[in-house]
Image (cartoon, grey):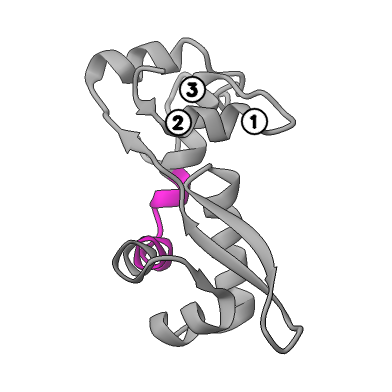
Amino acid sequence: MGYLSECSDTLAGRHRVASEGDQLLEVLAALANPHRLRVLAALRTKGRSYVSQLAREIGISRPLLHLHLRKLEDAGLVTSRMELSKDGKALNFFEIAPFDIALTPASIAAAALTLTTTPAKISPQGDDHG
């Protein structure tokens, strides 16, 4: 992959195989949210963490954090692992997956050629934005 190295093993290990362009869109969509950037920053700074602890650190609810973690995990940017605490509680620990994103005009153009999503039809007069 031209734009995404190291993370490709995580992405390729999923059940569905997306094109390079589709993977790029998924990663960029996952990163295009301030809460998810804060999640990645917290995991980078403090290391792996379980949901309740991470929610307290970031200052968002656990249900909202779960949504953001799912998006990050689907994009291959974080991994999770269920572990039992000493008192027998199941805790879902999250940590950052190794990734290195390099965007260049050439890598974007190459990824665009592999997109499986089709662009919305635009009338000859343009869309609402002109």
Residue type at mark 3?
Gly
Task: Give SS at disc 3.
Answer: helix
Residue type at mark 2?
Leu
Q: Which residue is mark 3?
A: 21
Could one spot residue 123 in this view of the protein?
no
Q: Is residue 50 left or right of residue 91?
A: left
Residue interval drawn in magenta: 29-40
113 is higher (above) or lower (below) than 44: above
Q: Are marks 3 and 2 in contact (CB under 8 Å)?
A: yes
Front of the two marks 2 and 1? 1
What is the x, y in percent for residue 39? Answer: 41, 66
What is the x, y in percent for residue 117? Answer: 60, 24
Residue type at mark 1?
Gly
Residue, x 23% and y 22% (percent of image)? 104
What is the x, y in percent for residue 53? Answer: 50, 83
Task: Give SS at disc 2.
Answer: helix
Disc 3/disc 1 C-alpha distance (Å):
17 Å
Mark 1 burial class by Cα count in 10 Å: few <14, some 14-19, many 20+? few
Front of the two marks 3 and 1? 1
Q: Which residue is mark 2?
A: 24
Q: Which residue is mark 1?
A: 13
Q: Quadrant of residue 18?
A: top right
Residue, x 57% and y 51% (percent of image)? 73
Magenta stretch holds residue 92: no
Q: Quadrant of residue 102?
A: top left
Residue, x 49% and y 28% (percent of image)? 8
Dominant secondary structure, magenta: helix
Disc 3/disc 2 C-alpha distance (Å):
5 Å
Check the image and name the residue furthest to the left.
Answer: 104
